[in-house]
């Protein structure tokens, strides 16, 4: 563990203090042969400890958060905090290593419940360790989709952030797929007020399986931009939703050509005042 600690200390100095890039790829390579980096205990100041597999890109979201206090989806987190109201329910669909769920619990919103969905078995093990005994975050080892079934999740070696039920590449593992509607009806989850979707091209299928819940509860929908999603915006406009693009500082615009647009978009339900967020 002394060697692992020394390597991580070097990364924190190189990336955090010097602001240089490239050390992550070096550590990923070293981790393939160093057991201490495959189960590295990272202390998150004031929050506890997470176990990281530094062979995987996703683990560096936690490490970088500890180093510089930022997340690659900082704009999305900023918007979630702005939209959230105390006592609401957040769904983190495609939770990956759990940092979005953790930050939404720790740093804003006052969520009563965070339902965290992640089908990748390797990542679920880590999520269950992070949120063991937690009274806000619940982990669900399922993918959400348009039917109750099973499907093959394609996992890219060393890059869990790009595991997908749609795109090929990497090894395959069979996972359980559930519709969000069926889980709400069974009361195995609480109905959402805000849904964050990051499912690597599977977003339309997730939304199809949530049709009843969306009509009944009108949650805000935050998701990655794609032509397939933009094609279904009229369906949500008919329900009173407003389609927006999330800017790099976590605000909203209705202009897709605004140079401040990032790679995420939002469908805002009727009755939610976003006037202070629009640019």
Image (spheres, rainbow, N blue to C red):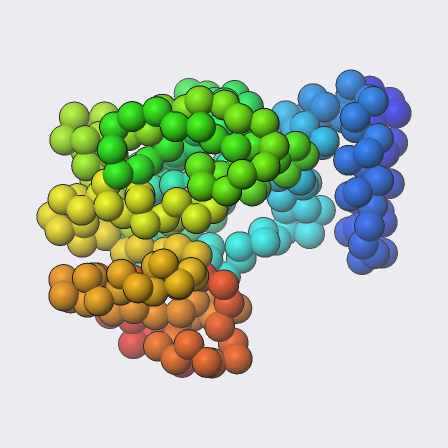
Residue 225 visible, this angle: yes
Residue 274 location, quadrant:
bottom left
In the visual, does 123 lie left or right of 16? left
Residue 112 visible, this angle: no
| Residue 5 percent across, percent down from the top left | 82, 29
Q: Residue furthest left?
A: 216
Q: Residue furthest front?
A: 168
Quadrant where the image shows the C terminus: bottom left
Residue plotted at (33% across, 36% down) = 144
Residue 35 vertical placement versus 44 (above, below): above
Quadrant where the image shows the N terminus: top right
Residue plotted at (66% across, 32% down) = 157
Residue plotted at (36% across, 48% down) = 203
Residue 35 location, quadrant:
top right
In the visual, does 27 lie left or right of 206? right
Between residue 247 and residue 230, name the one nearer to us.
230
| Residue 78 percent across, percent down from the top left | 46, 60
How many numbered discs, if any?
A: 0
Between residue 4 and residue 205, name the one nearer to us.
205
Residue 189 vertical placement versus 229 (above, below): above
Residue plotted at (67% across, 34% down) = 158
| Residue 51 percent across, percent down from the top left | 63, 25
Residue 241 location, quadrant:
bottom left
């Amino acid at each position: 563990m002394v060697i692992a600690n020394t390597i991580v200390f070097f990364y924190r100095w190189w990336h955090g203090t010097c602001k240089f890039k490239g050390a992550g790829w070096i550590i990923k390579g070293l981790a393939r042969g160093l057991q201490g980096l495959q189960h590295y205990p990272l202390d998150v100041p004031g929050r506890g400890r997470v176990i990281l597999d530094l062979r995987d890109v996703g683990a560096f979201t936690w490490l970088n958060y500890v180093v510089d206090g930022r997340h690659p989806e900082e704009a999305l987190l900023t918007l979630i905090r702005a939209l959230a109201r105390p006592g609401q329910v957040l769904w983190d669909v495609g939770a990956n290593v759990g940092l979005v769920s953790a930050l939404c619990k720790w740093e804003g919103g006052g969520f009563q419940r965070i339902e965290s969905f992640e089908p990748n078995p390797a990542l679920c093990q880590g999520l269950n360790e992070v949120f063991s005994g937690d009274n806000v975050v619940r982990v669900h080892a399922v993918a959400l989709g348009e039917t109750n079934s099973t499907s093959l999740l394609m996992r890219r070696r060393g890059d869990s952030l790009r595991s997908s039920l749609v795109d090929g590449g990497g090894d395959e593992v069979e996972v359980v797929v559930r519709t969000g509607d069926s889980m709400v009806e069974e009361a195995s989850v609480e109905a959402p007020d805000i849904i964050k979707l990051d499912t690597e091209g599977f977003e339309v299928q997730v939304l199809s399986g949530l049709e009843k819940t969306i009509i009944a509860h009108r949650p805000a929908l935050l998701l990655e931009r794609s032509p397939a999603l933009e094609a279904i915006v009229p369906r949500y406009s008919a329900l009173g939703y407003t389609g927006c693009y999330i800017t790099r500082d976590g605000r909203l615009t209705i202009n897709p050509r605004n140079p401040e647009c990032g790679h995420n978009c939002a469908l805002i339900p009727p009755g939610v005042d976003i006037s202070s967020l629009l640019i």
